[in-house]
Image (tube, grey):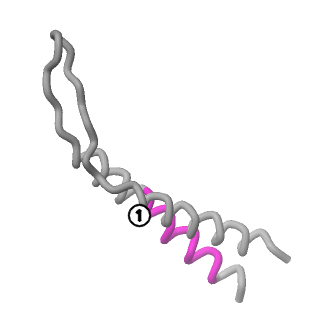
Amino acid sequence: MKKAIGGILSIGGLVGVIYYTYQYMQDSESFSALGADVAISTGNWVPIVISALVMVVGILLTRGK
């Protein structure tokens, strides 16, 4: 039972990391300064960290005895 829950958490966490990282990359503003393009991200990184933690917990549950 723990392995099934761990697998679900791992997959859900991975999907969350991918989705929120993509969203984070899209929430950026760029401007030109001295001939170079500078991008500043205005996204929120907290959902990425939470998704990564869920993924790690899922992996640990899957590997447990």
Q: Position of residue 60 (x, y in %)?
A: 72, 68
For the image shown, how many numbered marks are present on the structure? 1
Quarter of the image where one finds residue 46? bottom left
* Residue furthest out toward the bottom: 1
Quarter of the image where one finds residue 48? bottom left
The residue lying at 22 percent from left, 48 percent from top is 27
Q: Is residue 14 left or right of residue 29?
A: right
Q: Is residue 34 left or right of residue 51?
A: left
Q: Position of residue 10 (x, y in %)?
A: 58, 68
Q: Amino acid at mark 1?
A: Pro
Q: Is residue 35 above or below residue 52?
A: above
Q: Is residue 62 above or below residue 49?
A: below
Q: Position of residue 26 (x, y in %)?
A: 23, 47
What secondary structure do most residues of the magenta stretch adopt?
A: helix
- Mark 1 is surrounded, within 10 Å at the Cα level, by few (under 14), some (14 to 19) or many (20 or more) other residues, namely some
Q: Secondary structure at mark 1?
A: helix
The residue lying at 50 percent from left, 67 percent from top is 13
Quarter of the image where one finds residue 39? top left
Instruction: Confirm whether the magenta stretch covers residue 6.
Output: yes
* Residue furthest out toward the front: 33
Q: Is residue 9 above or below residue 19?
A: below
Q: 33 or 50: nearer the eye?
A: 33
The quadrant of the picture occupied by the C terminus is bottom right
What span is colored magenta in the figure? 5-17
Q: Is residue 9 left or right of residue 65?
A: left
The quadrant of the picture occupied by the N terminus is bottom right
The residue lying at 56 percent from left, 77 percent from top is 8
Q: Circle 1 sits on which residue?
A: 47
Q: 1 or 61: nearer the eye?
A: 61
Q: Is residue 20 above or below residue 7?
A: above
Q: 61 or 30: nearer the eye?
A: 30
